[in-house]
Image (tube, coloured by chain):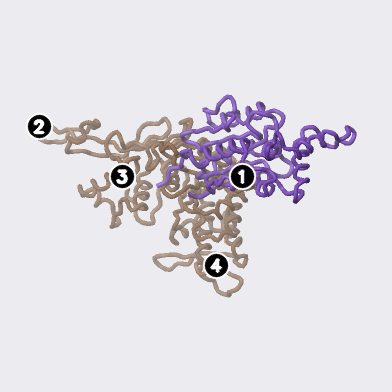
Amino acid sequence: MSGLHLDSLDIDNFRCFQHLRITRLGRVNLIVGRNSVGKTCLLEALAVYANNADPVILQGQLAARNEFVYSGEDLRDLEQSERLFEQYVLAFGGFFHGRDSRPGESIASISTVDGLKKVTFGLNFFAAERDEQGQLRSYRVLPKDEYDLADDVRIRLSVRRNAGRHQSRALFAHLKPGQFLTRAEDDINCLFIPSSGFNNSYMAELWDRIALTDLEQITIKALRSIDSNISRYSFLKAPPNRYPIVKHAFYSAPIPLRILGHGMIRTLGISLALVNAKNGILLIDEFESGLHHTVQTDLWRLIIQFANQLDIQVFATTHSWDCVEAFQQASAEDQTEQSLLIRLEKRRDAAGIEAVLYDKRRMEIATREGIEVR
Amino acid sequence: MAAKNRILLVEGNDDKHVLYSLTKAYDIPDCFEIRDRNSEGISGWKRIIEDLDVELDRSDLESLGILVDADENPVGRWHSIRDRLLGLGYSDTPVNASSDGTIVVHENKPTVGIWLMPNNEDRGMLEDFLAALIPDYQGNRLWQHVTESVGAIPREEVRFPDARKSKVLIHTWLAWQNEPGKPFGQAITANYLSARTAGSEALIQWLRRLFVDSPQSVPQHI
């Protein structure tokens, strides 16, 4: 077991966070709080950090929020249409506090509190320099106060990791549906489970990477914690998709996992993501989605155990009291004491959002005295 | 407004029932919850001080009252509370406890009120506070008889330490009523102890200021 990817967190100018500081992070972190305090935002910030603000990740986040939905398989259309490009830049402003996509306002950063680990990303604006014949000579960085005057502006994504150089990248990345992101050398292995879960094809891809390994046993263990009649599972091809099937003691032939309920699919998704997140970061939005409270404690136990063994840092969000209780119970049993409950809330003095932390001691007191932590 | 957002912490069950009866007698709106922190092996006082950081982080909490016994050392007890509050960021916590009951306000934290039994100044506990609720406390002949009788116990038969003498007195007083041995809360309702005295007046005013009248530092929600 080695150190955590992030021992603390500072987020600046990212979405709903003008500034958010979390002074301490655990190995397994459960994030609670009311609607619109930014629980999902926090997961998105972590995904941006882990992937060095890769344009594919950014595009995916905009699409998931319906902020920019494109049709067609090829984003090249997008680059060629000025109207679409403008729409995209406007939508891109959604990444910054105040939804501002103008020069100087559109820079966000995600870092540890000491600033030693840091990803900064933003929009870079360049103005075209033309000679007297109208031929393009060069591009120069466009100062903030000239933005409204310039008519030939080129916009690039600028990314900086730690104390490295600013990297200029295209705002769009071409990625066909189902295609995987190629990880750059300094990217952190990061999986994000949306509240709606993975689709079957993606789960099949995750399974392909671990089939017949010891890691596969962990996923079987997760399914068996809900229904011990399950002995194995696999994926069946039904072009263009694949879907999970299981061997169940009550049936002689394999049955689709889905007929055992949504909780089974959720559990398979979470456990597949867990074992694929080795040495990386696992993000789970709305953990409880589809899960009956009786299975949540077992699932948390599994996550805590393998987060330690496989050196994964986990961040999950929830609205559910059941989920908080299950998490408290599983983390009370954990001897490493590296679990943390984090409540995001709006500050009383209206100066943004702050985080309230509950470690093992504070969770125990809250449980014993019936103190509401959500 | 949900009652649970304003909470009064007390050391034990007796405190809780005395407070119930007093708030009823004074018609205080039912806008706060009284919780006792009595548990096995650890005193209510210790529990309240140790757990205070978590109590104050209860989600949506608006104000928290702490009602504890001064015991033998009111100044020392006040300093323990003050140090804890300063450590939790309540930088405006006054150097001395206010005789009217202290209230500390913070722009980004729940309001905190502190009451040291019996009256924020003297040594003592709940039972000393209750003694002041005896009707016509100074000239009451039965009370005079109680104190004289307890005082006349032969030294070798005294089975309680001096620190518990006020407990002995109040229980003796309650033993010699029409219905002997009523618990404190019911004794107030039965008027064996009078809610309407100067002693309880100040406590009631503190509760009103803390939970009813004062503007609350309310968590922001959309």
- Residue type highlighted by circle 4: Val
| Residue at numbered disc 4 | A246
Pointer 2 indicates a residue of which chain? A
Outermost residue, left side:
A133
Q: Is residue B73 left or right of residue B9?
A: right
Q: Residues within 10 Å of mark 4 (few under 14, many from 20)?
A: many
The chain that appears brown in the image is A
Q: Is residue B191 above or below residue B91?
A: below
Q: Which residue is mark 3?
A: A92
Which mark is drawn over residue A132?
Answer: 2
Residue type at mark 2: give it.
Glu
User: Disc 1 vs disc 3: Cβ atoms closer than 8 Å?
Assistant: no
According to the colouring, which chain is purple? B
Crowd around label 1: few <14 · some 14–19 · many ≥20 (10 Å): many
Q: Chain of mark 1?
A: B
Which chain letter matches label 4? A
